[in-house]
Structures are given as structure tokens and as C-alpha cells.
Amino acid sequence: MNTISTNLLVIGGGPGGYVAAIRAGQLGIKTIVVEGAQLGGTCLNIGCIPSKALIHAAEEFDKAQHYASGSAIGISASAPSIDLGRTVAWKDGIVKRLTGGVGALLKKNDVQVINGFARILDGKTVEVKQADGELVRIRCEHLLLAAGSEAVELPFMPYGGMVVSSTEALSPETIPQQLVVVGAGYIGLELGTAYRKLGAEVTVVEAADRLLPAYDAELTKPVGAAIKRLGIDLRLGTSVLGLNAGGSGVRVREANGEETLLSCDRVLVAVGRRPRTGGWGLESLQLDMNGRAVKIDDQCRTSMRNVWAIGDLAGEPMLAHRAMAQGEMVAEIIAGKRRHFTPNAIPAVCFTDPEVVVVGMSPGEAEKAGLDVISANFPFAANGRAMTIESTDGFVRVVARRDNHLIVGWQAVGRAVSELSAAFGQSIELGATLEDIAGTIHAHPTLGEAVQEAALRALGHALHI
Amino acid sequence: MGIHVIKMPDLGEGIAEVEVVAWHVKPGDTVKEDQVLADVMTDKATVEIPSPVNGTVTSLGGKLGEAMAVGAELIRLEVEGAGNHSGEAASANTATAARQHTSTSKASGGSSDTVDEFIPITVAQPETVVTTVTSEATAAPAQAAPQRPATPAYTQAGGQASAPSHHGRAAGEKPLAAPAVRQRAWDMGIELQYVTGTGPAGRIQHADLDAHVARGQRKAAEGDRRYAVLEGEQAMPVIGMRRKIAEKMAEAKRRIPHFTYVEEIDVTELEALRVQLNTRYAGQRPKLTLLPLIMRAVVLAIRKYPSVNARFDDDANIVTTYNAVHLGIAAQTDAGLMVPVVRNAEARDPWSAAAEVARLAEAARSGKALREELSGSTITITSLGALGGIVTTPVINRPEVAIVGVNRIIDKPVILNGAMVARKTMNLSSSFDHRVIDGMVAAEFIQTIRGYLECPATLFVE
């Protein structure tokens, strides 16, 4: 068997792993990335990017259909249609371009990519079964675990047939007549909304008593209203029992205890993701775990020396940008720099319609953390730009400490507010106060004005409301 | 020209010996009337001896730290006119003119003052124990560098603990800094938690890092002293107050077979009562600490066990018990340990006792306590408050026969009615003179105190 040696071996070529490898390459660390599927991981191949492409396509189609029935703007269209095959091909093109770009970046930084699934032998040795079946053994000084996560399967309703995960839902060959989405988290709502816009009748089943349970009710209210307007049937407090015998529907128990059958021709299970810890010899390292995730410290060190873990494998929040930041940091630590993973906030975006973005603490979370805070909303109904893009739903909310006006959180809901996450993240990471944001000129006419106005309003002197 | 002799005045209470703790003049100095010549010390009071006349010092009657007999020649002055070297009048004058106070001595050695520069020293302020190393009062100006008053370590520690962080952040609060500042700090190996942030909301800025580094460099320029080899030694004459303490302690330990008894007291109820009383009488009565309540418990326990409220004259073999309870309260002062006495503690309610303790402690610390306020105790309580430790072995304030030591209060798990609960507990570490107090009596005495303290209503309901 062929044995090669390296300084750093990265298991997993997702956003965490490939960024770590690029940075390590930049710093002159001899690095190998092992990837069993495609570079870019879940994010590029079956997650963030393809879902946003599909959501965009669905929006465009939805818009065209609105034009078909006449619009206030004055545009009309006749009988728009969608060629799903071309839509998926277009999406795959984007994915291919991006994953190809990752490969080029790795090459540019002298990172060796080995295709195949890794199996850990010990903390310094990994065996890879390459695509052609040949085994290669890699010895390394540093082992970076970046194997990511996988969709959680319902044991009584395993994937297969009409039951699909987000992966299959992102490459549909057809649009189902009736889709049941299990889970009203961000994945379920994003895809459920897209499918609705693409023409499916959608029912979303959620065991909790409200949608997007991770966010506060005020923030998710516009999302709920929009879903209702779209005609999505949202069943809260409802649990899934399984497929019916005939395979023509999903049996659920409603909030009132009644059992109902939701007839459907496809079921999307989106009940969460869990760290991918099984099947590649991870257990042989006997690392300390944090629940299902690998336990790490603020430098992404595991309980074994020179074995590191980043991203979804290391638990919540399972976000690509977190994994990237961790990967970059680990490469720098291995290169001898002193680094810690101590962000003030990690932004989270939900690409529903309208979008939701949260950075830092909500008023409730701040209160729970023992902070005395003030918070203020600025509604997009009072924002000129929002009117010009026909989207006045939603608001920007700021949360700041009462004593020194340090901003500890931003939340927004509304069309295209995901782009505000940059401003939110910067203000919190730089330690901005309400006065800093209120005193910054924000371009007119943009949605960003609502950011400044929220800060002004928290200070008691909003100008446009 | 005549000679004026000043003799060691009789300072009362049958004192036969007086110790010279500071000379403020040396031979050759010109002195004016009322100028302080020397500090002398009796049992516990320090007395300034002023000059009754104008003149020039020709000789000193004793060395620093020397015990001199009352009536012995203290100082000899050359004066205009006849002088008094054959008369006794001067000593009487001196005695009446002597100003009493309880300070020990002054760090500034008067012996180094010349006539021209002499600044009359008025009422002495309590300072640190004198560190002058000249054993001869007639020696040249003192060599020893004046030392800073040695602040007791515990006040420093206490001050730090209660003071707000000098970084302007509350404890446990994360330092606020932009990512670039954070990264630079990591690169420089600086822990941001130690850096003062001057930006808005306490944000640490690049300039703050620079300032932090500059401070560090200033320290480094002075050299790394942490592991430096240290040389030299400081001889400190044990005189004055310190010698008195040393003698008393040695004598107490040499003569008295100490028997120390430690018991744990559950003070949960007592603390609750104290807090309740302080809330109820906020602004109307002085705030109560635990001490006045413990004092009351001791007074009440003495009613059952009067033999611990006694003084033992072991030369004459007589134990005298007292009906009154004169409670000595050991107090730390800059000069050293003092024991101001709350007279007739049995006749004081907790607030009155608290006020009296506060008054006496202040008097002792400022050096204004009268001798009667520092003597005559029949039993003593010693407490270091939060520094009380878990167990102490207090030394009996001879000739008393018992001392009650108060240890600190801690929250601890206690089994109560079969369940573990959090209670406030405090130890009493007490010593008894085993020659006259049997272990049984001592134990019963402390158990009685415990009974009062654990059921505090009994302190008031009799």
C-alpha cells in the first residue's frame, strides 16, 4: 500500500475543510484534503448554494405568474411555464462552477486533494479508499476533522421512495402535486416555500407550536403571514406518525389529538441535521464528545493532541461561515500563530420569503443573559426603498445595553434583509454603540436606512417614524 | 547659667518603670519651652514629655528602649538662670504638663533634627513602629531610611477585593475589541482581559494596546525583579508597644497552660436576625455586626459560668471573679494589637455595645484612647472578621482566664432533619486558663454561648 506523509490532513472538503486547507497552503503547511464526494461539501453541493438557486428560480417563476394575473406595476405576462430540467441544470452549473473554483484554489495553494472516503486508524494515520478502489495510507502531524453533518432521518419513515431529504429535494425531476414538509425550521420553510411557488400544494407539519422555533415570535410573524398568503397549509403542534399503508399520504396527529391523513405524493423530511460521526473510524480516537458532536475548545482542539475538529461535526451552530472561520483559525494555529475562536456573534440567515436574519442576542436572550437592554424596531413600511421593491413587510430591530449603548444584537425580517447581515455583523464585532450606527450616514434609498433608523429610534429620536 | 534636670515623671497607677520609646532631641540641641523632648511609654499609654523651660540639651538620661525608673533623671538641660539641679519642682511640672496619648512613637527620628530646622512636633499621630537603628540617642543622625508605614496586608487585600476592576469592566465581562485589535493582541501575546479599554462602551482600541505595551516596557526597563537575588536585612528594635505585646504574649504563654476549645455555631438564624434588625432600624440605630450579639451571648453565658469572668493573680494565687463584665475587644491598630475595654458590657444592649465598640476602636486607632479604656478587662473577645479563619488558638489576655475567638462565617452544607441544607456556620475558638478553668466548665460555657447564638431570641428574652 502506498503511504504518504503530510503536515496537515483534512478530512472533508466542505467549507470548513477547504478553507482550512487553503489557509494552510498559504502559510506553507504541507496539506492534504480527503473528500469522498465533491469538494465544497454540503454547502456547495446539496445545501446553501443549490437551495438559494432553487429559491431564486421559484421566486422568478412566482413573479411571472403574478404578472400573468395582472400587477400593480403594470407588467403582464401570459401563461409562464418552467422547464424544471433546465432549472436544475442551471443550478448544477452554478454548483459546478463553484466546486471547480474550490479545486482551483486548493491547487493554487499547493494543497493535494485525494478523492475517497477516509477511515481513521489512529490520531496520526488515516487510510483512504480511493475512487478506483486503491488504498492509500496517509500519515500526518495534524489531523483536522471536518466531516460535516447529515440530515436526520425519521426511524419510522426512512428516506427512500417518496420520502426525501433536502438533498433530493434540491434536484427534483418533477414537482409533486402534494408535498408534505416535516419540520418548520429554516430548511423546511425555505424548500416548502420554493415548492409552493413552483406549483406544489404544500403542507408543513411542525411538532412545536410555532414556525422557526429558534427565533422569537415577533420576528417570525411576517414569515407566517407570508406563508399563509402563499397558500401553504401550516400544521403546528402536529406530529408525524408515518406513511399510510397505501403509501399515498402521511399520517399525523394534530394538536387536538386527532389522527389525520395528509395525502401527498412526496414527503420532505427536514427535522434537522446531526454531526457525521459514524462510519469513518472516528470512534477509534475515543474523543470527548459534546452530545453527538465532537467536543472542542476555543481553538477547535479536541481531547486528543493535534487532532482538531471544526464545523458541523463540532456541533451547533451548523453554519458554513462558522466552519470557514474555524478552519482558517486552525490553519493559523498550526502555523504557530496565537488565535482563538471568540466571535462576538455568528450571523444566521433564513432564506424564507421574507428573509430572516439574526446576529447576536434578541431582547429575550439578552435578558436571559442578565443584561439590561433597550431595543427598537424600525418597520420597512416606513422605508422608501422597501416600497419600491414592493416589499414593506418586516422590520429591523436593534438590541443594545442600556448602560453604555453597546449593540449586542440585530434582527431583521423582510425581503433581501440577508444582505444586512454584513452591517449587523460588523457593528457587533467592532463593538459599535447605538450612537456609532446612528451617526453613520446610510445611503438613500436603501433598506440599510432602516438599520440607522432603528439605532436612532433606540436613542429616542428616529427621524422617519 | 544653671542646670535643669527633668526627671521621669510619675505617670500614676503605681507604675515604677517607664520606657523611653523616642528621643526628639539630642545633646547640643536648643529646646524651647513646651517642645517635646521624648516619648515615654507606660503599660499601654504613650506620653510626650515636653520641656518646661528654654535651654540646651546637655545629656540624655537613658537609651532608646530602656526602661527607666520613675524619678530617674530623664534629661539634663543647661538653662539661663539658676536651674533646678538641686530641686524637685521640675519633675512635678513635667508630670502635670505631660500630654497623654496612646501613640507609640514617630518614625521621624527627632535625633536628626538640628536646632535651626527643628519643627516642633505636636500631638503625635500614630504611625508605624519606629525603625531607627541607632541604639544610642546621642548617635549621629539616624542612618535608617524612613520606612513607609507598613500597611497591614489584610487591608490591602480587602481593598483590592472590594475595589472595582481598574479595567472598567465588571467581573467576568468579556473584553470588547474589534477583530483586528484582538488579532494583534494575540500576536503580541497580550491577554485582552488585562487591557484597559478607553473607547466607547469600554472598547479596547489599538492605542490601548500600545499603552498597555508601553507600561510593560517601563516595567521591563526597570529590569525583571521577579527573580532577582535580594540582599540586606533590616534590624528592627522591638521596643515600645511591640515590646509590650511581646512580653505580654510570652508571659501569657509561659505561665498559662492554654486549653483551646473549638465549637461550630450555626449562625443562620442569628444572621437573619441581624439583617432584619438592621433593616428595621436603618438610619435610626447604628448598624449591627455580629460582634455585639456575640458580646451579649458571652455576658449571658457568664451569668451561668461566672468563673470564666475573672482575673488570676498567679503570684498571689488569688482568682478574682467579677460581677461586672468588662469585655476586652482585641483590635488591630497601626501600632499593633490593642484591647480596648467595653466596661459593664452586661448593662449595654446590642446597639449601645456596638456604638461603644466603634468608639473605642476609633479611639485606639487614632491614639486617643485613655489608659482606663485599655485596661481592666475581665474577659476578652478576639475577632478578625472575614479574616477569622476556620480555627484559631487565641492567647489569653493575662491575667484574664478566658478568651473567646470568633472565626469567619461560611456557607456550608449541613445535615438538618436528615436533609442536606445550606447553613451559615461559624466556629468559636476559645482558650482558657486550665489552671483555674476545668475543661468541663469551659465546654459548658461555650455550649451555652452556642445555645444563645443558635436561638437568638433567647438573647433578648430572659
Image (cartoon, coloured by chain):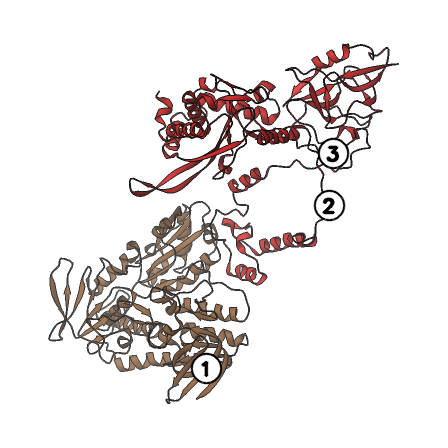
**Is disc 3 surrounded by few (<14), some (14 to 19) or many (20+) residues within 10 Å?**
many
In the rendering, what colour is chain B? Answer: red
On screen, residue B371 above or below A287: above
Chain for numbered disc 3: B
Residues marked 3 and 1, same chain: no
Residues marked 2 and 1, same chain: no
Label 3 to label 2, Cα distance in Å? Answer: 16 Å
Identify the amino acid type marked 1: Ile
Identify the amino acid type marked 2: Gly
Label 3 to label 1, Cα distance in Å? Answer: 76 Å
Q: Residue furthest right?
A: B1
* Residue B32 location, quadrant: top right
Chain coloured brown here: A
Residue B326 appears left or right of A266: right
Give the SS element for disc 2. Answer: loop
* Residue A242 location, quadrant: bottom left
* Horizontal and vertical percent position of residue A396: 36, 56
* Residue A128 location, quadrant: bottom left
